[in-house]
Amino acid sequence: MKQFQYVRPATQQGVLDVINKPGTKIIAGGTNLVDLMKRGVTAPDKLVDINQLPLKTIAATKTGLHIGALALNSVVSENAVVADKHPLLAMALKAGASPQLRNMATVGGNMMQRTRCGYFYDVTMPCNKRAPGTGCGAIEGINRMHAIFGASPQCIAVHPSDMCVALAALDATVIVAGKKGERRLPFTEFHRLPGDHPELDNHLAKDELITGVEIPDNNFAKNSYYLKIRDRQSYAFALVSVAAALDIENGTIKDARLAMGGVAHKPWRLFDAEKSLIGKKATEENFEHAAQLAMRGAKGYGNNSFKLKLAPATIAEALKHAAGLV
Amino acid sequence: MKKAIDSIMPSSSAGMSRIDGRLKVTGAAKYSAEYTPAGLTYGVLVGSTITKGSITSIDTKAAGQAPGVLAVITHLNAPKVPGDQPEGGKPVPPKGAFKVFYDDKIYYNGQPIALVIADTFERALFGASLVKAQYHTDKHITNLPDNRSNGFPPRGEGTYKRGTEDAWKAAPFKVEQEYIVPTVTHNPMELHAIIANWDADNKLSVWDKTQGVKGTQEDLAHLFKLPVENVQVHSQFVGGAFGSALRTWPHEVAAIIGAKVVKKPVKLVLSRADMFTSVGYRPFTWQKIAIGATADGKLTGITHEAAGQTSSYENFTEGPTGVSQNLYACPNVNTKYHLVALDIATPTWMRGPGEATGSFALESALDELSYSLKLDPVELRLRNYAEKDPESGKPFSSKFLNEAYQLGADHIGWSERKQEPASVKKDGWLVGYGMAGGMFGAYRSGATIRAKMNTDGSLLLQSAVSDIGPGTGTAMVLIASEQMGIPAEKIRFEMGDSSLPNAPTQGGSATTASVGSAVYQACADLKEKFQKLIGNGGTDKPDYAKVLKEHNLPSLEVVTETGGGNGMEKYAMNSWSVHFVKVLVNPATGVVKIDKVACVADSGHIISPKTARSQVVGGAIGGIGMALMEESIIDHRYGRYINNNFADYHVPVNADIPQIDALFVNKPDPIINPMGAKGMAEIALIGMAAAVANAVYNASGKRVRDLPITPDKVMA
């Protein structure tokens, strides 16, 4: 590991003043960044610790729930309001990592975590995300964990988060502070697809800081489910995960939210599948139809082609769980 | 039935707790990397980034000038290892153990090409990142299936035939299938670590992770041409090994070379990534099994072929086909075993070496046969029960496998199993049962024990033996406690140091039989010495302290050496196991959940019920890992492991493991040793992978023949 400077500005403004410098990285929980530094994937000159900033609060607003960027994953997952109003988020958080990691990891840090692609982590391998222009090791390599949606010839990595899948499904808003003030953007537009710039994971500018997320009030609490399919029962990244939220009245679906993890460079919202469910009965048949719609445009790369079958199966299962059919 | 089982099976609370348990859970137990000799320095290895070829240049300047760096050692400047050099003008044989920093040749990706030593670990790590090598690259091969035609028979172990070759072909019922066991890495929790120090020019001390301090002592004495007594090996605690610490590895030699250069103690701890390339693994093995049977389920022929990978510089052999020769009474058996040399590091023995791999194929194939015969898999095994050793015709020293089948079947609720696959569904999950067995030779070798009774009535036992986790010290204390008639709290067992009396390396499930026999005999000798003091009329177990005081003696001591026993001449000696597994399979997603496990060991008399139970549970978990998730994956284009970390290389976590019940037949073997105890470690894992695979088939109708059984393979 390279020697680096470590600073801990007292205020948010102090943080914003220093993060724009080249070679500077923000550290919160450090559960991903420190690994990346140990492996030489990233070698910052300066770490800016933000744990002292007052961004840990979880509080109801007029229109929803605000969660501070520094709220710990474990705290959010155990929060009574979250459990009551947004159980999908609690379920997704608990499906991620291990209790030890959740005790360190923050909401903002979870959003900022890098892909777990093995080629990204091994500095001797080609990887356009780590070293633009070196190629993608995964496209013709070991790509069992990789994307089936929205990939590019440059990169087929996936975003590893569970939390983000739930937040994307719940139409959360990301609140970002910059030198020019606050900016709000839809959660689904925070992360980006790899395109020709896989080195960029999201649309956060270099001089910006995530301060929190906001989840609008909804009627999904009763019929939500997060289903994560993985190679072991805990502490493994998703092969495929599905966040499903339904608003059901008298057996008819009034509204639906669906997002998938483990399939794309960002949490993958299933807008067409959602639309297909509205006004329909909550039946296995309708769920399977929605799952098929969700798979439009999916592409396998060899090792990961099983996801073309696993993904719709998981969508249908998650919907059945959400609707209480299982 | 429950009551009958309880009378045989020690519950988790029965028996004495591990004598060093408190030390281990409180952190007081000191492992090899935790010693801090004065002037300690830190070494970090640099690994090659190509798979085959040679180093054309290596730039160590920046590393050498980095802060705190004391030395950068490469093949260009490393002091020669005397044992690696040609002797008497004879050239060094082209094959043999890998010689670290010997020359510019690269044999595998990740091969150590430099050692950076610094005053702190972090500075050594940074220094290591600055070493840059240039290579001449040759074409490599790391893929066994594509190169199986290059296989060759290992010397003396290639083929076996009994009766008619390929007799299975003529049978009315037959199965012929191929099976894959991928590369599996031992990955004990404790990373391999050594602290090496030259106490004088010709005196070496190491704190080292090893399964045998005496073996390591001999290896190092040979390599550095030192008198054996000038090498001290300390390894008091070992945090798991499963075979990875059975031999001396390049990183150990590198640390010792480093200590010679910097003239200070050097600590070298492998990284988790290094663990995949530096300390062996269970070799990727392709197998083909064909079995023939009569309509009433009598086996008429087994043909078993295996091809296992080895390195280009060394032949590693194990016995994957042995289980087909010995497990069942079958008149016609022929087997063939080949090695395929690849550009990878040498594999090594891993828990249940050979048999764990072979039993996956044999016991899966037997299960497949049971379905074509429409015969219960347990019944099929009973119809081919070997009453004597099928290979040699010798009687078994003891075998109660039939009782083990019964115990396990009763415990798992085997009668609930439906012969028709995919026919039971509960709460949306398919339910299935599977079983498979295993065997492993019951070995015993020589060992020496020093036993010393003190005037306070305490007994000190000393042996160089290691304890990699099974609870060796605990079992030895229990043997001595019973023999001497004194409480266990009065007995101390000192181990894991080369200065102590001779003991075999801990491997092959032979420690209790070997060292335990020496403890047993040492106690007998010590009691006899007391008898001589007391004279006629004394009791067998006198008040030792009182006797010593009466005779004005500070202590009484014996050093007892026992041999390997001679039972092998007349008897075939084995431990047996059978595993019963109930699984749930999700029909939509292919997820497999282990619901219930019952493992039965026929391993003679159980000396330490509590640690024996732990050992069986641990073996079962290792077997579940092998069955469902463990696989070290190489990207063959680069020859590099792609999942060499604990996020991507999956071992079971608590959520994967249900209650595992360990059951013991617990009948002493009258031949192998005076305690009647046979080995347990290997059989606890052998057969488990097939039991899971068989249960998955029964639940889902999906037969997975290439491990691990991940959701994609089950749903496909």
Image: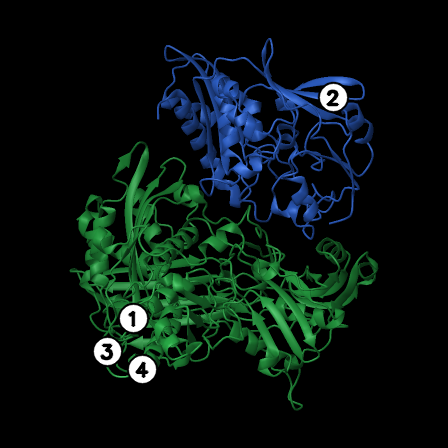
Chain colours: A blue, B green
Task: For the residues labelled 4 and 2, say whether their Cβ atoms are less than 8 Å apart.
Answer: no
In this rendering, the label closer to the viewer, 3 or 1: 1
Instruction: Indicate which disc, 4 or 3, sits on the residue closer to the N terminus.
Output: 3
- Image point (66%, 32%), residue name: A112
How far across and down, in percent of the image, does residue A201 sit? 68, 33
How far across and down, in percent of the image, does residue A164 sit? 58, 28
Q: Residues within 10 Å of mark 2 (few under 14, many from 20)?
A: some
Choose between B630 and A149: the one closer to the eye.
B630
Q: Which mark is residue B675?
A: 1
Q: Which mark is residue A177?
A: 2
Q: Amino acid at mark 3?
A: Gly
Q: Which mark is residue B566?
A: 4
Tell me how far mark 2 sits from mark 3, CA to CA. 81 Å
Please identify the residue farthest to the bottom as the structure is shown.
Answer: B88
Tell me how far mark 3 sits from mark 1, CA to CA. 26 Å
Q: Are marks 2 and 3 on the same chain?
A: no
